Amino acid sequence: MPGAGRVWWSAVRPATLAASVAPVLAGTAVAIHQGGARWGAGIAALVVALAMQLGVNFANDYSDHVRGADASRVGPLRAASSGVVSPAQVRLAAIAAFALAAIVGVALSLAVDWRLLFVGAACLLAGWLYTGGPRPYGYLGLGEVFVFVFFGLVATVGTAYVETGRVTTLAVLMGCGIGFLATAILVLNNLRDIETDEAAGKRTLATLIGRGPTRVLLLVLVCAAFAVPIVIFTTGLASVTVMAMHFGIPIASMPVRTAFATTSPPKLVQALKRMASAELAYALLFTLGILL
């Protein structure tokens, strides 16, 4: 029987935290390019993003247990279904994480622009209803849309906005690029779980369209992410930034090859972790290109 510490660490899903760090890093790089970053606002945005990611992870863990979707799980250990910690504790952890995101988000919104309160409310509502509520949209094949919008566009553009007070084409384009790779992480997750999700009646996009089209979607997402720097170049960004970002292609191509080559859940878990690394590398390379 695993210890409580190991169970909670698994529930955190550390590989997915790159989906929180990457957009904040990219948004801050955009702010630097536009004349300077507000580091206090950037750190607050990072806290909000990480708390939101933890809240979604814990809420998903709890909701999947309640709905029986973890009965034959092949992926990493889930806390609520582990028998080590109670489902109520996992639910409380989700509420606490969302509460932290709300508190810091409210303070940041009031300091920058009160209209951001509406954006924050939408993020919290979307995070909880992803797998919670009477009709969770994560069970209706809409999880990829949620990840692209909130962990791509909103997180990246929002970070740039709280640091500069502006929404620019560069921020939106980078939000799309980050969103494509964040979505690819979820696609790999759902590809790994496709059989068990089908058995549990969990309707992810992968279960709706099948393994073959899901693999093609993964490839399209990664290709789209690395097409973004080319589009950015046409807006006048220095070519060194575009070249730097394309050094991430080998990192992102490895999990795609794994997805096409195997159905082994352990190998797909490793592919998911590599895709998370690819997203973080994408943001780091963009930042490096901006600084150069």
Image: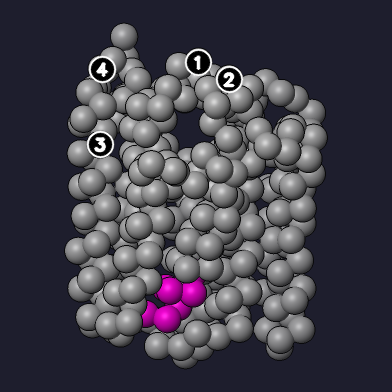
Q: Are marks 2 and 3 in contact (CB under 8 Å)?
A: no
**Which of the two residues, 257 or 106, is positioned nearer the viewer here?**
106
Classed neighbour count for the residue bearing mark 3: other residues with Cα under 10 Å, few (<14), some (14–19), many (≥20): some
Determine the secondary structure under disc 2.
helix
Classed neighbour count for the residue bearing mark 2: other residues with Cα under 10 Å, few (<14), some (14–19), many (≥20): some
Name the residue beneath numbered marker 1. 72
| Residue 263 in view, yes or no | yes
Q: Amino acid at mark 3?
A: Arg
Separation of residues labelled 2 and 4 (CA atoms)? 25 Å
Separation of residues labelled 2 and 1 (CA atoms)? 9 Å
Q: Amino acid at mark 1?
A: Ser
Q: Magenta stretch?
A: 156-162
Determine the secondary structure under disc 4.
loop
The answer to if 161 sits in the magenta stretch is yes
Q: Amino acid at mark 4?
A: Val
From the top left corner, tell me how far across and down residue 163 is, in percent: 38, 81
Q: Is residue 179 above or below residue 134?
A: below
Numbered circles on residues, count: 4
Separation of residues labelled 3 and 1 (CA atoms)? 21 Å
Q: Residue at x 55, y 26 (%)?
A: 201
Whichever of callouts 2 and 1 sits on the residue coming sooner in the sequence is 1
Q: In the rendered structure, find residue 199 and report the number of the disc placed on it.
A: 2
Q: Amino acid at mark 2?
A: Ala
**The quarter of the displayed image where residue 261 is located:** top right
Q: Is residue 82 above or below residue 162?
A: above
Name the residue beneath numbered marker 3. 91
From the top left corner, tell me how far across and down residue 218 is, in percent: 72, 46
The answer to if 253 sits in the magenta stretch is no
Q: Are marks 3 and 4 in contact (CB under 8 Å)?
A: no
Q: Are marks 2 and 4 in contact (CB under 8 Å)?
A: no
